[in-house]
Amino acid sequence: MFSLARASIRHHRGGFAGVFVAVFLCAALITAMGVLIESGTRGGIAPQRLQGADVVVGAPQAHPVVEDMDAPFAERVLLPAEVVDEIAAVPGVERAVGSIELPLATTDGTTVSAAAWDSAALTPYTLTSGEAPERATEVVVDESFGAAPGTSLTLTHGGEPTEYTVSGVAAPESGVDTGPAAFLSTVGAQALWPHGDTVATVGVIAESGVRPEQLSADIEAQVADVVGYTGDRRGDVENLGGSAARSTLLLLSGSLAGVAVMTAVFVTAGTLSLSIMARRREFAMLRAVGAGANQTLGIVMREVLLVSSAAAVLGAAPGFLLAWFLGNQFVAGGVLPETFVLAYSPLPALAAVAISITAAVGASLVSARGTVRAAPTAALRDSATEASRLGRGRVITGLSLLAAGLVAALVPIAVPGTAGLAAAASSILLLMIGAGLLGPWLVTGALKLVQPLVRRSPSASLALAEANASAFPRRLASGIIPLALAIALGSVQFFMPTTVATEAERQSRDGVVAGYLVHAPGSGVSEELADEVAELPGVESTSPVARSAVLAKAGFAGMEDGVQPYAIQGLASEDLNGTLDLDVNEGSLDRLADTDTVALSVDLARESGTGVGEDFDFYYGDGTEATAVVVATYERGLGFGDVAVANETLRSHTTTGLNDYLLVSMAADTDAGDLASAVSGLGLTLLDKEELGAAGAAERNADSWVSVIAMLVLLGYLAVSVVNTLVMATAKRRPEMLLLRTLGASDTQLRRMMGAESLLIVAAAVVIGTVLALPPLMGIAVSVSGLPLPTIVPAVYLGLAGATAALGLGSIAVATRAALRAER
């Protein structure tokens, strides 16, 4: 049987070339997604400041979730200072050094990573000149400052400047790049550290001959509530962005992988179906000379197995290059830190090969089963034309999926918040699969609408195009559906972020009553400096704002769904009236000044089933578990975050202990220039309120960048696949074109006929893709704004539709010219 399959492949090289290309691209795409998923579990950031430590010990930095990924905390979870002595007492530990990190800035706004001089040994840094700092106003800096021992250097913390004397200059080991670094004396560091007798991490230097892995296990066994990190995992606790980036990458790549696999399998199945349809006459002849249905089906499956195996193996290698490209784009978009390293192994390639081959063979089974089992006479008849009639099971499945997709798109009407948003965004997959199953139906319906217009036309080319389309609805659907898939998926991926961002910006713009905001370049704003700003001439009211993220239990349809991160802001409730309006729905923000109180957005209150006067359970960014009484609910959660607490309360749970910015209202008779000068005199910057970004804007922008890049990759894959499919379909029509030419049709008429068909394909794809994208986008808009009005950027939509049209028209035109030249 395999010898027959190989002979058949050689005889049908042109047809199997299309199958090869589809499977090749499928394997490359799945490999790339697999590398990203694996990097979400094994990738990370190599240690820099702590690379001299054999083991780095920190507190648990994530909330454990049963049967799911642990949820990372947004802030540093701290350790009590006495833990350093406990770790030092563990056998095998030569030295244990507690480490803290302070956000300082130079006068020009350059961020400086500062710590106590004791922790310099963990990099390790060594003095190249001068002495270690001893007094609170002494500092050791690296060579990037260009300062010599004895010179003065001004550094700010929370916007407050302090003049330090450079006591020495230090340099790290070769190959270490920590950026601008400064080391204060122990007294000076503790004076700026806002969390009292605590440390961020503990660097452990092992005794000679002690394995770091074993020492880490011993420390975890003998010291409560700590986690030991060795090797490259030390970077996770040094830079919390690495661990958070892995979690983000795993979630995003997992979601993208699902879409990619669905798209790849969908396109591969369509290509195989087209290839098999072109050989129906051959299968009918095999049946007529005595071949059994299972024998014929076996030949087809072996053909596809041979072709797909070669294509999948060859396609896996470019997948690694694609993963590298995507990783670089995620770094450029701010999703991954610059030093994040992807994890490469053979596993993604092996999985991609297995999935691609399985998808191809499975698709061949489904596509060929009906063809090879048909009676020889019926198969010969059907090889000359097609019927739009679909099987009952296919119709029921297609209609059910379309109905399910529409219901999912309408979920936000009944279920507000993230659950409704996720349901609406996911509905496009159901709608697309349903449309794919009912493709011939959709084509037949479209043809019935245009037939009266076409039949009135005197053009022979239009008449021929309509006749061909009516005779081969399945062939036409094989070109329309992939193009529609590109438009529908692209529209949802491109316009969902714009819809959410537009509403967030509107809420932020409408909610800020203050005319200006004040921030400190390179760092936050201290409480003392906020008081100084409030005393400036012309300042009517100020409101300090701190931002972070919390973890809270989420629910859907009455069922608990683990914990989710929510943006939180710390507000000084007594100063809000003249600066901020959250559009309070129930209760009062004045009560935030009370102990253990919280305000929630209306969406989060509904999701959590919590009302005013009830308790709300959550975890602060530093891992502290809290229960607070809900004193108010407000409407503008998307613009300002879903949770609000007292400013001082939130700052005590952030790593820096600083405010992010100040909202400032100016008296009516105050000159803005005078106020800007006064603020500048404090080392701060005065900005217009329009420059305030909505809560979570940076994260949304990063996610949007990921979606755009991933969608461009998918659209590129679809583009090549569509070209492949359309060229295959057109090339198979050479006998048909030869017959029409013999009957008197000119090449010009044939090209016009194919052009008319391509216009029909493109028009139908644009209409179907747009119609399928509208319900999800309207559901997304309802979820975020309450109105079914998504934000669609006309230039992006026209570009997407135009690129799709160019693909369809260009592919058919090129293949038609090639077919006509070949038949001369």
Image (cartoon, rainbow, N blue to C red):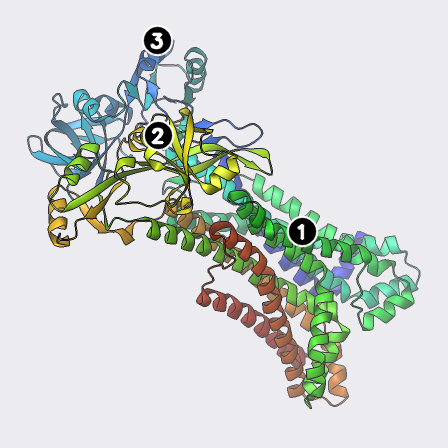
Q: Are marks 2 and 3 in contact (CB under 8 Å)?
A: no
Q: Which residue lies furthest to the left in this view?
A: 150
**Mark 2, secondary structure of its residue:** helix
Q: In this view, does 269 lie above or below 590?
A: below
**Mark 3, secondary structure of its residue:** loop
User: Residue 50, position in %: x, y?
Assistant: 32, 27
Q: Nearer the viewer, mark 1 or mark 2?
A: 1
Res. 268 image quadrant: bottom right
**Mark 3 vs mark 1, CA separation in Å:** 62 Å
- Residue underneath mark 2: 238
- Residue underneath mark 1: 404
Question: Is residue 576 or residue 283 the one in the foreground?
Answer: 576
User: Residue 531, position in %: x, y?
Assistant: 17, 35
Residue 563 relative to residue 526: left or right: right
Disc 2 residue type (three-letter): Glu
Q: Is residue 589 above or below residue 624?
A: below
Q: Is residue 130 above or below residue 489?
A: above
**Mark 1 vs mark 2, CA separation in Å:** 46 Å
Is the residue marked by circle 3 packed among few (<14), some (14-19), or many (20+) residues within 10 Å? some
User: Does label 1 or label 2 sit earlier along the sequence?
Assistant: 2
Q: Nearer the viewer, mark 3 or mark 1?
A: 1
